Amino acid sequence: MTKVLLLTGRRSDYQTERTTDAIVRGMGKDFTVTAGFIGADLRDGLTAVRWVRRHAKQVDAVHAFGTDALTAAAMGFDGPIIFTPTEFPTRRALRWTRAVSAYRNVQAVATTSTQHRAMIVGGLADERYHLIRPGVDFSKIRRRRDDALRAQLNFGPDDFVILLNGESTRAADHERAVWAGSILHVLDPHVRLLIWGQGPRGQRVARYARTMPRPTFASVAVERLGAEVSYEALLPATDCVLVTAGAPVPTLPIAVAMAAALPIVSTVTYTVAELLEDRHTALMATNPTPREIARRVRDLRDDSRTQWHIAETARGEAYAHFSLSHMVQQYRTLYRQLAGGAPVDLTSPPPAPVAR
C-alpha cells in the first residue's frame, strides 16, 4: 500500500481542483491519498505544517500543489515531496524551489512543456523535473446544445455565444476578450459573450463588460447560475470559445473546450501553441489586438466548414493527448517509484484514444 499526503495551497484554480479530485478518487485500492487544503480545512500555513507532521510517519510522500503548500510540506516532512506549481513559476518561486530542494528530495511536476523549460532554466537538476499534462474528465463533457440553459443565461436561440476560456486571471487577459466581443456585438447584436466569472479577476472583468457601449451583450455565469456552476456546465450554451491569453495559462480549460468539439479562436503564446494550431484545431490571431481577434471570430462564424473541421480535429487530439486515465497512471507511477526509492521514469506512452 502506497500512502500519499496531498496538500493544496490557498490559490487553488480550476485545473488544480480537477487534478487533485482525480488523484483522490482514481488512484485505486493500492493507494491511500489523504488530502488537505490550506485556507479551507487547514486554516493557515502553520496549521498545515502541524497537519503534515501529524501524518508524516504514516505516509510515503507528500504532494504539494502551490508554493505555500511546498513550504508547509518541507517544514513538516523529510521524505520525498512532489511539487506541482499552480501558477507559472516566477523567479522568486524558482529560487525558493531550489532552496527547498537543497535539503529535501523535491520532484517537481510541470503541466506544460513551457513550464517544464522554465523550471529547468530556473536551476534545478533535470532529473528532478517531470511533465504530466492535465487530464480531461470526458464524463463531464456534454456536447448537445441546451437551449434551456442558454435562456437562463439570457441568450436567445439565434445568438452566437462566445465563452471566455477558463478563469479570469491577469495572464488570461479577459479584458481584451471583452473589448473584442463588444466590437462584434456592435457589428451584429446576435453576437454575445459568456463570462464564467471565476478567478481572481472575475468580478473586475464583469464590471469592465458593463462599461461597454451595450453592457447587456455579456452574461456572467456565476451571477445567473450561482457561484458553484462549473466550467463544463457552460459548454452546452456555447457556440465558440475565445482564448485571449498573453502569458502562460493553465491548459485544462482549453483541452476541455477541445474535447467538447467547440470551435476555438485564440491568440498565440508558447503555452497555447502546445495545444492549438492555426486552421487545424483553432483559428489563431497572430496580432493579438481586439480588432484582429474580432476579425478572426467573424471569419470563423462565416465559415461553417472551418468550424466543423477545427472542432472535430481538436476533439480527436483532446482524446489522444489529454486522457484522464493516463494522467492518473503517471501519478501512480511517480508515487510508487518515490515510495520505493527508485529513479523516477514517466516515459511510458499514453494509452490509445478511445473511439467515441
Image (tube, rainbow, N blue to C red):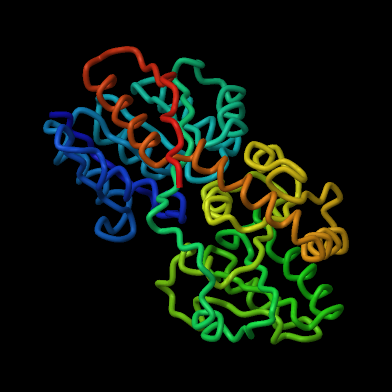
Quadrant where the image shows the N terminus: top left
- Residue at horizontal 45%, vertical 26%? 99
- Residue at horizontal 25%, vertical 23%? 336
The quarter of the picture where residue 81 lies is: top left
Residue 46 in the image: state x and y as whole percent: 28, 49
Q: Nearer the viewer, residue 284 or 291?
A: 284
Above or below — where is 243 with respect to 108?
below
Horizontal arrangement in the rendering, residue 303 relative to residue 129 (left or right): right
The quarter of the picture where residue 216 lies is: bottom right
Horizontal arrangement in the rendering, residue 171 relative to residue 341 (left or right): right
Q: Nearer the viewer, residue 319 or 103?
A: 319
Q: Nearer the viewer, residue 195 or 121?
A: 195
Above or below — where is 192 with respect to 51?
below
Residue 270 in the image: state x and y as whole percent: 70, 37
Residue 7 in the image: state x and y as whole percent: 30, 44
Horizontal arrangement in the rendering, residue 1 relative to residue 17 (left or right): left
Residue 35 in the image: state x and y as whole percent: 24, 47
The quarter of the picture where residue 122 lies is: top right
